[in-house]
Image (spheres, rainbow, N blue to C red):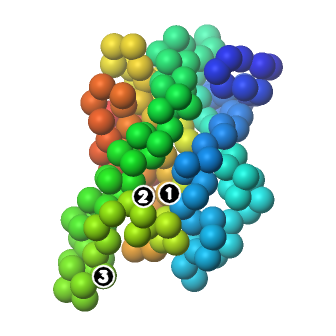
């Protein structure tokens, strides 16, 4: 089924979600060229900037207006969203337990999103059915060099916050 702005999406009743792909060329820059050994090479879709898109639908009524607004916002403002998300990834590196401490002690702490080009890779995007005002929250799942499991949840009015893969479920 083709739904604007999601593109081609298919309902997965087991997951209570709509599944598709979203093109995010700015996010594709990260982890695409000469990734670190722990990331390994990206797949072809990631190189092309296509990421799996999951649109949660616990009510079973289809994507909401707020979910559509969130995806439109992401597509229209991708560079700014990417910068906000990557800033949270930098924060996770600084404050992320043992690895954060070790990075600080060894002087390996990254300071800018550009320094993350070879150390992080987005592996999926989830649009929550939790909404605040006109937008739903968007979760970005990442592979990173310093932890096994990292996500950043973004909302146009509330900003971004990092957590583990359950972060999108905790908002």
Q: Earlier in the sequence, mark 3 or mark 1?
A: 3
Q: Is residue 17 above or below residue 166?
A: above
Q: Residues within 10 Å of mark 1 (few under 14, many from 20)?
A: many
Q: Is residue 156 above or below residue 100?
A: above
Q: Which mark is residue 12?
A: none
What residue does disc 3 label? 108
Q: Cα distance, mark 3 to mark 1?
A: 19 Å
Residue 120, image x and y in percent? 49, 65
Going 24% across and 84% down the picture, which residue do you hit? 107
Q: Earlier in the sequence, mark 2 or mark 3?
A: 3
Residue 74, image x and y in percent? 50, 32
Going 80% across and 19% down the picture, which residue do you hit? 1
Residue 110: which quarter of the image? bottom left
Q: Which mark is residue 150?
A: 2
Q: Which mark is residue 142?
A: 1
Q: Secondary structure at mark 2?
A: strand
């Amino acid at each position: 089924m083709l739904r604007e702005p999601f593109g081609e999406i298919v309902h997965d009743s087991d997951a209570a979600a709509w599944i598709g792909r979203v093109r995010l060329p700015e996010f594709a820059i990260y982890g695409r060229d000469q990734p670190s050994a722990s990331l390994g090479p990206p797949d072809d879709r990631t190189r092309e900037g296509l990421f799996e898109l999951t649109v949660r639908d616990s009510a079973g009524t289809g994507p909401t207006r707020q979910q559509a607004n969130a995806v439109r916002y992401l597509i229209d403002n991708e560079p700014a969203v990417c910068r906000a998300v990557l800033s949270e990834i930098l924060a996770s590196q600084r404050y992320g337990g043992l690895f954060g401490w070790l990075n600080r002690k060894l002087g390996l702490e990254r300071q800018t999103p550009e320094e993350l080009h070879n150390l992080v890779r987005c592996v999926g995007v989830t649009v929550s059915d939790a909404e605040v005002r006109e937008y739903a929250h968007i979760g970005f799942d990442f592979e990173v060099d310093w932890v096994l499991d990292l996500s950043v949840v973004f909302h146009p009015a509330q900003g971004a916050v990092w957590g583990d893969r359950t972060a999108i479920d905790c908002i």
